Image: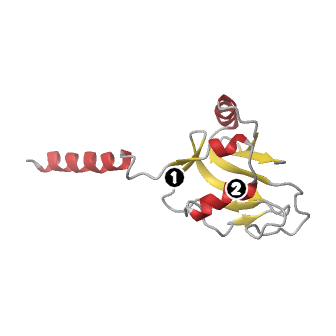
Amino acid sequence: MTRIALNTLTVLAVLGLGLDPGVCRAQALDAQLDCKSNAHAFIAPLVSARSIDPNPMRVEANSVNAFRPAQGSDLTAFGFRVYAVLGYEPDDAMFKEGSGEPIKESSYGAVVIGSVEAVEARARETGSDAVIRQVVPLFLTAIFCSGH
């Protein structure tokens, strides 16, 4: 077998492993982003499954905690790759408090890589009534549920 053919087979085998569902740990958060839950019920299973780092990478002044996906966790929301998972539940030790006035109700969501228009269209297709907001133009979009 020629060297080129062997290299081609090697590349195809590696790519095939990357597409095998048994090797990938993709986890869709779509069902949880229906806004019928609370922050603890959204975040706790992700921490237990080691899908997110249990220590927030950022805590906003209003106490919303932003958690980084664990390396290799491949979280998605409505088909978009998750950049961060958000949450805060008043009086819940899982969440750190920020420097300002904490929000008064349980809130949770995700920040995804995708345009606000595309994310909102997919969220509405699933029946989610989450608030969809642009974080960084043409790059990051927040999906946020609160009041439950």
Q: In the figure, 100 relative to 29: above or below?
A: below
The residue at the point 62 percent across, 59 percent down is: 45
Outermost residue, left side: 1
Residue at which label 1 appears: 74
Helix, strand or loop at mark 2: helix
Tell me which label, 1 or 2, sits earlier in the chain. 2
Image quarter of residue 92: bottom right
Report the disc number at residue 147: none
48 or 83, nearer to the observer = 48
Q: In the figure, 99 relative to 104: above or below?
A: below
116 or 95, nearer to the observer = 95
State left or right for residue 17 relative to residue 61: left
Image quarter of residue 101: bottom right
Mark yes or no: residue 135 visible: no
Outermost residue, right side: 101
What is the x, y in percent for residue 112? 63, 47
The residue at the point 56 percent across, 39 percent down is: 79
Mark yes or no: residue 145 visible: yes
Q: Residues within 10 Å of mark 1 (few under 14, many from 20)?
A: some
**Gap in angstroms between the C-alphas marked 1 and 2:** 20 Å
Helix, strand or loop at mark 1: loop
What is the x, y in percent for residue 59? 76, 65
The residue at the point 70 percent across, 37 percent down is: 116
Instruction: Identify residue type, mark 1.
Output: Asp
Image quarter of residue 123: top right
State left or right for residue 55 relative to residue 74: right
Instruction: Identify residue type, mark 2.
Output: Ala
Residue at which label 2 appears: 41
The residue at the point 84 percent across, 62 percent down is: 90
